[in-house]
Amino acid sequence: MSTIVLFQQRYGQWALVTGAASGLGKEFTNQLAARQLNIVAVDIQPDKLQQQVSFLQQQYGVQVKPLLVDLSDPAFLAPVQRETAELEIGLVANVAGLSSVGPLLDIPLETLQRQIAINCYAPLTLSHHFGRLMRERGRGGIIFFSSASALQGTALVTNYAATKAYNLILAEGLWDELRSSGVDVLGFAPGATNTPGFHHAKPRYTAIPMPYMEAAPTVAEAIAALGHTPAESPDAVIEPRPF
């Protein structure tokens, strides 16, 4: 039996990916579509989202439903529920995130609050909603994107690191609660990755010479780890593994 068929048996026909229009979220949609999963693509960037939707449809021949949603809106779940009510979402990848670099007290409070909404409230909300449905069906998977910065207090990304620590701890606990029900949970904690979101945050990266991780092998590592471990913090250079 092919790995694609095995993957579909485990996670069904539909995956929901946040941050789907760029960076790691975009790469997630690519690799899941390559496994012939249909995609609910959630993002706030209309033009980039539509471009990715068209690419997935043409490249992989899968169904793709774009959802233009602001995950910082406390009421964001209502349109997601409405648009997915007839779909069996078997895999949720909580990839969307907001980062900023600088001393905590120099960053506007509104930005910090929006980070918490997007990085913590949104994945909790999505995972609570879809996780209950997965538990009822006895199969599914949920991925929380954490960060290597979550492993300790990290200056200049203090709030971001704290939000990613929340995701890691949430994933580990939920993994234990759901592992007997057929639902896989993973907290994935990569290092600095070469994505538009990382560069948009304007990190002082030249002062700390470290290799970037690239999106494709990073996502491949996350997919390979799902169902095998509650948490994964990969090295900077990763070779994809088969499912």
Image (cartoon, grey):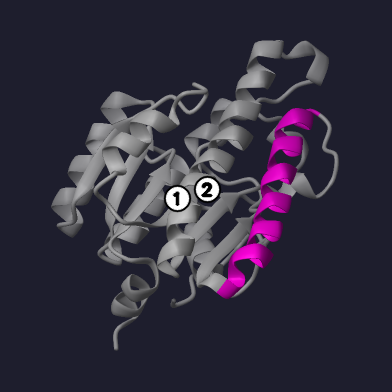
Residue tagged by mark 2?
127
The quadrant holding residue 138 is bottom left
For this orientation, the residue located farthest to the bottom is 1
- Up-down: is 47 above or below 11? above
Q: Position of residue 33 (x, y in %)?
A: 28, 58
- Up-down: is 239 above or below 113? below
For this orientation, the residue located farthest to the front is 136
Image point 29% across, 50% down: which residue? Answer: 39
Q: Quadrant of the C terminus?
A: bottom left
Task: Name the secondary structure under disc 1.
Answer: helix
* The residue stretch that appears in magenta: 156-180
Q: Position of residue 31 (x, y in %)?
A: 36, 60
- 170 magenta-colored: yes
Image point 32% across, 66% down: which residue? Answer: 12
The quadrant holding residue 216 is bottom left
Q: Quadrant of the N terminus?
A: bottom left
Residue contact between numbered discs 1 and 2, judged by CB atoms under 8 Å: yes
**Of residues 103 and 63, the one drawn nearer to the viewer in this rendering:** 63
Residue tagged by mark 1?
130
Image point 57% across, 62% down: which residue? Answer: 185
> Residue flagged by tag 2: what amino acid is it?
Ser
